[in-house]
Each structure stands twice: as structure tokens, then as C-alpha cells.
Image (spheres, rainbow, N blue to C red):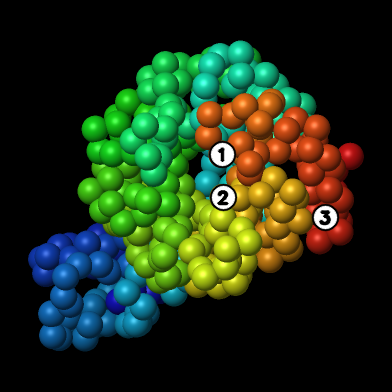
Amino acid sequence: MIVVMKSHADLTDRDAVLARLAENNLKGHLSEGEERIVIGVVGAKIPAGLEEQLQSMSGVQTTLRITRPYKLAGREFQQHNTVIRVGDLEIGGGTPVVMAGPCSVESAEQLLSTAHAVKAAGANILRGGAFKPRTSPYAFRGLGEEGLKILAQAREETGLPIITEALNTRDVELVARYTDIIQLGARNMQNFALLEEAGQTGKPIMVKRGPSATVEEWLLAAEYILATGNRNVILCERGIRTYETATRNTLDLNAVAVAKRRTHLPVIADPSHGTGKWYLVAPMALAGLAAGADGLMIEVHHDPDRASSDGPQSLNHLNFAQLMQQVRRLIAALDPELAVA
């Protein structure tokens, strides 16, 4: 349920509504738009008669039932797009952002080389995994805190904010200490304890869609973070598992368009994991932006053939620079006001 306040409602009116919700073991989340203030009501069960009580309170215009299981993530709760600020950068503000870098941090030389290359090509955020979830326990699983230190060094040298993954609850505090955005990977989309732990840091959190998850399940994962009071949630479509074997996954651009309609949260497209083929990354990256994505996540490596993980889907520095030229031309075609040299 949402409670829509009158335009002239004051703080006393809003606090009275929040207090009434608390009396009924419910929590109220404020969303202040240009034309209306909405209180999203979340909790196990709304008691009989509460809706009528709220409607009679001072400053309340109306109450509306939300039929979707996710409340805070839905457009019903917040009609305007959420814009997440990371330093001077805006995610979801209308100008697409590009997150780029290697799958894994392998060494300082490797990461710094790619960090400077993606910055020169126009990337906005540096990605790189210090902790890596791998199908085999014998595969390279990251450098841990040493990888985080290398990422921080790259941020200092390039000025790029960084995004990296937290794999479990015990890593969250450590990762949050170093990174600007915490990534929660596809395998952890329904690790509810991890979602809540990450949300409580207050850091921006990017939730990747699970390989078998529906859009509704994906948005409910975001709801776990939003329910902690952290509004800085980013969604990432990274491909789903289908019967198709020509690509690693099937990049679901339907989901990008559906998510943009159903939620106010920014949506990022990841064509690297979505295809698993480096030569498919550029066309699907452009398609993702055309479908309405707020940005891209691209894997880039200075020598993909020797990468410790995900080499076949990584662009080299030259290919990434060429893709960024295409991205700028597409952005200019989609919205001439965003055209840049």
C-alpha cells in the first residue's frame, strides 16, 4: 500500500502517519516527488481497517493498494527515475554510463594498464573482481584484499570510481571500505542475507539478474536492499540461461525495457556475460542502449587470450576504444542534446 499525502501536508502530518504505521508493526518509506509526497507501506500484513484510518488523517489525500509483490522498487511508489550519485557521476540521470575493466584483478600492472586505457577511451567507472565466484573451486578466485588495494590505487591514478563484487556477508565490510559501488553477482541474487548486509552499508549496490530469475524475482532482490533504507540500487541484466548453445547466455533486452517500465531504478546491460563472445559485445552493447539501458558493463583486458578468467568475452584495449566511438555516435543519434565529441 502507498499513502499519498496532500501537497500542503506538513512534517507533523507525515510524522503522524509514520507513527500510526509503526503502531501496526509496519514501516513507512518516504518518496518526495515534484508533485506529490508518497509513503510506501511495507510489512508482513496490513491490518483490517488501517487503510480507512489513514485516509481520515490530516494531510492524507488517498491510499492505494499495490498489487505487485515488490513495493519500494515499483513505479507506483516512485514515478520519477532514481538518480544515483557517485562523486560527480550520475547513474540514471539520462546520460548512459560505461563500467569497464577486467573480470579479475590479476596484478597491479595488468589492472593499471587497463584502467588508464578505459579512462582514455571514455569509460566512467572501473570494474574488476578482487573476489571471484567460479564454477570450479580450482579456478583463479581473485586476489582478495590485495586486489582491492590495487583497485584503490587505480582509482587514485585515474580518478575513476570503482565497482567490485562482494561474495558473502563476511566480505561486505571489507569491500565497502575500498569500493564506491558494491556488486552482487548473479549467483548471489537471492542470497538474502548478503542483500541485506550490503544494503546496510549505505553504499550504492548493483544487483545482477540471476541466470534463471524472472524480472519479478530480480526486482524483489532489489526490494531487500531498498527495505534496509538504502535507495541506491542499480539493476544489471547480464543474460539468462536458455536452450540456446551458440552463446554463453541469452542477453534479455526484453527485461531491460520491462524493468525500465516497472521500476524507477537504473538498469545496466552487461553484453560481456550476456553473450560470452567478444565479437558480440559491441552489437549487443549498442542494442542495450537502444533498448533503454542507463549504461553498460564491459569486460576489458590488455591480453584477453591470457586472462585468468572470462578471456573469450573480453575486449582488448583497441576494440573497447572503437566501441566507445560507436557508443558516442549512438547516444548522439538517440538524444542529440547528449552528443559529445
Q: Secondary structure at mark 3?
A: helix
Quadrant into which the C terminus falls = top right
The residue carrying pointer 2 sits among few (fewer than 14), some (14 to 19) or many (20 or more) residues within 10 Å by Cα, namely: many
Residue 310 is marked as 1
- Residue 154, percent from left and from top: 58, 19
Mark 2, mark 3: which one is toward the viewer? Answer: 2
* Residue in the image at 81% along x and 59% along y: 335
Q: Image check: 135 left or right of 278?
A: left
- Mark found first going from the N terminus, 1 or 2: 2
Identify residue type, mark 3.
Leu
Mark 1–mark 2 CB contact (< 8 Å): yes
Q: Which residue is mark 3?
A: 330
Identify residue type, mark 1.
Asp
- Residue 11, percent from left and from top: 32, 58
Quote the CA–CA distance across marks 3 and 1: 27 Å
Q: Is 6 or 148 nearer to us in this picture?
A: 148
The residue carrying pointer 1 sits among few (fewer than 14), some (14 to 19) or many (20 or more) residues within 10 Å by Cα, namely: many
Whether residue 13 appears in this view of the structure is no
- Mark found first going from the N terminus, 2 or 3: 2
Mark 3, mark 1: which one is toward the viewer? Answer: 1
- Residue 16, by quadrant, is bottom left
Q: Is residue 241 above or below residue 46?
A: above
Q: Is 161 or 134 nearer to us in this picture?
A: 134
Residue 273 is marked as 2
Identify residue type, mark 2.
His
- Residue 177, percent from left and from top: 37, 24
